[in-house]
Image (cartoon, rainbow, N blue to C red):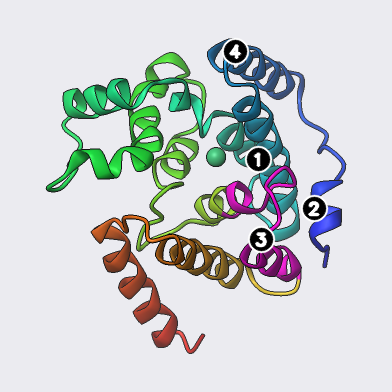
Amino acid sequence: MTGYEEVVHHREPDYSEAQRSLIARLEADLAIQLERKKHRLAHSLSVASCAEGLALAYGADPFEARLAGTLHDWDKALTSEQVLARARELGVDMGVDPVLVVPLLHGIVAARDLPVRYPEVPSEVWHAIEVHTTAAPEMSPLDMVLFVADGIEPLRQKSPGIEETRALVGKVALPDLFWDSFVGGIIYVLKGSRYLWPGTIDTYNKLAAARAGSGA
Ligand SMILES: [Fe+2]
């Protein structure tokens, strides 16, 4: 099995002409969308490539992973006020204090708005984008690939938690890799005394129960 370095430096699959042209169009649109956020643009393209590599390593769909990575932070172009306003318009359940959940909203808002703009993108991609900040009790392989790639793409600064997950690439099954990344993210939130979204505790418990049930 391939490790982190191979995932990062993988060879692009032999995509069809139509697939290649969709990737090029999305990348060009993203460059305009994130024109004033060069780091975010570089991160998005890096997640796209990392997700594609993880998908190849773990038997998920590399094309869908590439699309999901490319578009996952589309709404990071919005200000906090804008993303909050759009989430309200869309009727997203934000709990008692919407301001505290602002960092989680960009994926949900993009997953609801972008299908209108890109109807040719498969619905699985939108689901992966919807759950990429929060995770969910049910995670498909594509959901897990995007979640992990977002956390470990090579432009992310090293931290003990990120290094731990990177070292597990190719050594453990995808659900275990995702679990390490998910739990690492929670630890990061707790250690930084940041707000932990209550839904994350529920997701954690459901995933933990499912893992216990499966003997993991
Ligand atoms: Fe991201």
Residue 27, magenta (yes or no): no
Quadrant of the rendered structure where residue 104 is? top left
Amino acid under label 3? Ser
- Dot 1 or dot 3: first in sequence order is 1
Q: CA distance from mark 4 to mark 1?
A: 17 Å
Q: Which residue is mark 1?
A: 47
| Type of secondary structure dominating the magenta stretch | helix
Q: Residues within 10 Å of mark 3 (few under 14, many from 20)?
A: few
Of badges 2 and 1, nearer the viewer stands 1
Q: Residues within 10 Å of mark 2 (few under 14, many from 20)?
A: many
Judge: label 1 CB < 8 Å from ligand 1: yes
- Dot 4 or dot 1: first in sequence order is 4
Residue lying furthest bottom in this view?
A: 215
Q: Which residue is mark 3?
A: 159
Residue 165, magenta (yes or no): yes
Residue name at image x 38 percent, y 72 percent: 207
Q: Which residues are magenta?
A: 148-170
114 lies above or below 132: above
Q: CA distance from mark 4 to mark 2?
A: 28 Å
**Residue 87 placed where, x, y %?**
24, 29
Q: Which residue is mark 2?
A: 7
Residue situated in front as seen by the camera: 157 or 16: 157
Q: Which residue is mark 4?
A: 35
Q: CA distance from mark 2 to mark 3?
A: 19 Å
Q: CA distance from mark 4 to mark 3?
A: 28 Å
Residue name at image x 31 percent, y 55 percent: 195
- Dot 2 or dot 1: first in sequence order is 2
Q: Mark 2: which secondary structure?
A: helix
